Image (spheres, rainbow, N blue to C red):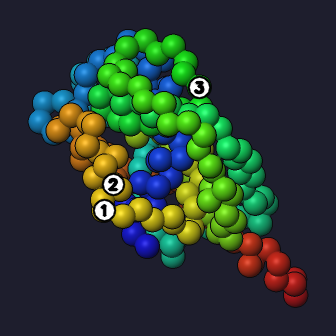
């Protein structure tokens, strides 16, 4: 499974967190190409300076041979329950929200979707990777703890296209380039290794 797919699926699960943080300030337009692209984010606004100056940015390339097994990590607690949700298009991203909080700006469309069944999110994952990074959109706030599942839930190309369809053209390819690791350690939780008897 590619890291790009892994990051995409994880991003879907935490979309609410990312967008909520992005709207904690007045919206400043950023993009993914040209004068407002990722390499320029730090100079668009002083609020975005971490996008250029930060040392713990995301996403990163997780190299499996370089991760460090951490026996102190616990199994992820994913307590999802069916809930009434709304699909939101905010222009640069789409998300599913449990309840509508008052956002400062940017919501272009809200579509009630009814009860969303979350049973598939509860499936156990025997392995995950953890590292300290940042939001992947401005303001690129750091000290975000990322838990990347070792087993990826895939979507079809048609499903991916349907998610992108409401977005403006410039935001349909909205992945930030990989960021330097800068000495960070990526930790590994592996259920099979935890169950091995000690020598």
Point out the residue furthest to the left here. 34
Res. 157 mark: 1
x and y percent of residue 66 in the render? 52, 70
Task: Find the distance from the CA under tag 1 to the CA under tag 2.
Answer: 5 Å
Task: Find the distance from the CA under tag 3 to the CA under tag 2.
Answer: 24 Å
Residues 9 and 155: in front is: 155
Res. 99 mark: 3
Do callouts 3 and 2 mark residues in contact (Cβ within 8 Å)? no
Quadrant of the drawing holding the C terminus: bottom right
Of callouts 3 and 2, the N-terminal one:
3
Instruction: Identify the residue shown where x is 56% and y is 69%.
Output: 151
Secondary structure of residue under mark 1: helix
Crowding near the residue tagged with mark 1, few <14, some 14–19, many ≥20 C-alpha atoms within 10 Å: few
**Is 3 left or right of 120, judged from the image as shown?**
left
Quadrant of the drawing holding the N terminus: bottom left
Instruction: Identify the residue shown where x is 55% and y is 57%.
Output: 148
Res. 160 mark: 2
Do callouts 3 and 1 mark residues in contact (Cβ within 8 Å)? no
Secondary structure of residue under mark 2: helix
x and y percent of residue 116 in the render? 59, 44
């Amino acid at each position: 499974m590619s890291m790009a797919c892994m990051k995409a699926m994880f991003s879907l699960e935490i979309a609410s967190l990312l967008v909520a943080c992005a709207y904690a300030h007045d919206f400043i337009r950023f993009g993914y190409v040209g004068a407002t692209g990722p390499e320029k984010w730090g100079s668009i606004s002083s609020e975005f300076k971490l996008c250029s100056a930060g040392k713990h940015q995301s996403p990163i390339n997780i190299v499996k041979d370089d991760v460090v097994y951490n026996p102190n990590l616990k199994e992820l607690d994913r307590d999802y329950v069916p809930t009434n949700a709304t699909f939101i298009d905010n222009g640069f991203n789409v998300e599913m929200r449990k309840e509508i909080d008052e956002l400062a700006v940017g919501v272009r469309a809200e579509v009630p979707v009814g009860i969303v069944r979350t049973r598939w999110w509860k499936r156990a994952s025997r392995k995950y990777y953890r590292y300290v990074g940042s939001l992947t959109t401005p303001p690129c706030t750091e000290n975000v703890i990322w838990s990347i599942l070792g087993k990826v839930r895939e979507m079809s190309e048609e499903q991916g296209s349907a998610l992108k369809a409401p977005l403006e053209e410039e935001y349909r390819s909205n992945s930030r380039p990989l960021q330097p690791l800068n000495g960070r350690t990526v930790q590994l939780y592996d259920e099979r290794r935890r169950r091995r008897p000690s020598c």
